[in-house]
């Protein structure tokens, strides 16, 4: 996956950002490649975001890592820590000691897109990576979709494993919880829990608050621990 060059627009953008850099990161050697997911391979909770940030994961090489102050990684990792899914509340670089427990983080698109807006075609080209990744996570019971695009991708992911979705398809809403009948690779289909993406656009406007995000991950913890 890290050598993929299937999306010319994304390849050009991620590599240009890595060359030009941001002023405060001039001393960094940017990752500048597709970013793999990371976390606990036995996770019961899977987080699906949108895409790497140009100067966050595209710089550090780890999902939701190294964003600017008040960026998405700051909010997300703090919430994971509060809910017991992380061993520390910060995510600064790949060697900072962060470990996720019972959680795994990935994204719908693995390259930083211009204006944080991947095209439908780019989402489609990256989708097989998510399918393969999900197949290698045998204990997932809850999928947390970070934003509407991630939610649509999660629905497509479940459908690709044979889960029959209701019609009309479920709609994204912060805090919405969906359960689907059927199985995925011999296990019950995971519940899907929605949250607004912890982007600065959402957090700085108050659309998403720390309390709202904490509530989502407390609910994810409860859902993961339900039943046998």
Image (cartoon, helix red, strand yellow):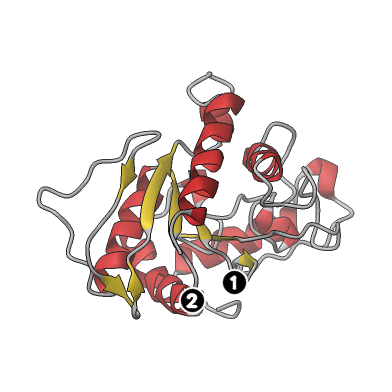
Residue pictured at 54% horizontal, 67% vertical: 11
With respect to residue 154, does 219 lie above or below? above
Q: Nearer the viewer, residue 193 or 62?
A: 193
Residue furthest to the right in view is: 27
Residue furthest to the front in view is: 228
Q: Nearer the viewer, residue 216 or 223?
A: 223
The label number, if any, that marks residue 26 in the structure image: none
Residue pictured at 58% horizontal, 34% vertical: 214
Provide the residue designation for mark 1: 42
Q: Of callouts 1 and 2, which one flags the residue occurring earlier in the amino acid sequence?
A: 1
Q: What is the distance, in whole Å, between disc 1 and disc 2 at their CAs?
A: 7 Å
Q: Nearer the viewer, residue 105 or 20?
A: 105
Q: Is residue 123 visible?
A: yes
With respect to residue 140, does 96 lie above or below? above
Q: Find residue 81 and report its image quarter.
A: top right
Tell me the quadrant of the picture where the N terminus can be found: bottom right
Q: Mark 2 Cα within 10 Å, few/some/many (few <14, many 20+)?
A: some
Residue pictured at 38% horizontal, 70% vertical: 127
With respect to residue 183, does 100 lie above or below? above
Q: Is residue 49 visible?
A: no
Secondary structure beneath label 1: loop
Where residue 14 appears, as percent x and y from the top left, is: 60, 60
Secondary structure beneath label 2: loop
With respect to residue 70, does 110 lie above or below? below
Q: Are marks 1 and 2 in contact (CB under 8 Å)?
A: yes
The label number, if any, that marks residue 138 in the structure image: 2
Where residue 48 appears, as percent x and y from the top left, is: 48, 56
């Amino acid at each position: 996956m890290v050598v993929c060059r299937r999306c010319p627009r994304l390849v050009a953008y991620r590599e240009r950002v890595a060359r030009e850099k941001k002023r405060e990161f001039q001393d960094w050697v940017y990752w500048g490649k597709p970013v793999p997911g990371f976390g606990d391979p036995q996770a019961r909770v899977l987080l699906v975001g949108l895409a790497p940030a140009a100067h966050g994961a595209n710089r550090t090489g780890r999902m939701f890592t190294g964003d600017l102050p008040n960026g998405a990684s700051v909010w997300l990792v703090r919430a994971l820590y509060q809910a017991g899914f992380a061993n520390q509340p910060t995510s600064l670089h790949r060697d900072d000691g962060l470990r996720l427990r019972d959680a795994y983080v990935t994204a719908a698109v693995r390259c930083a897109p211009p204006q944080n807006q991947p095209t439908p075609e780019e989402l489609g080209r990256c989708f097989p990576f998510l399918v393969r990744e999900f197949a290698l996570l045998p204990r997932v019971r809850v999928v947390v979709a970070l934003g509407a695009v991630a939610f649509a991708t999660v629905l497509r992911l479940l459908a690709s494993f044979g889960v029959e979705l209701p019609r009309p398809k479920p709609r994204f809403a912060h805090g919405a919880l969906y359960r689907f009948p059927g199985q995925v690779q011999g296990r019950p289909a995971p519940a899907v829990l929605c949250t607004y993406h912890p982007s600065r656009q959402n957090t700085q406007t108050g659309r998403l608050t720390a309390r709202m995000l904490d509530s989502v991950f407390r609910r994810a913890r409860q859902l993961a621990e339900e039943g046998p």
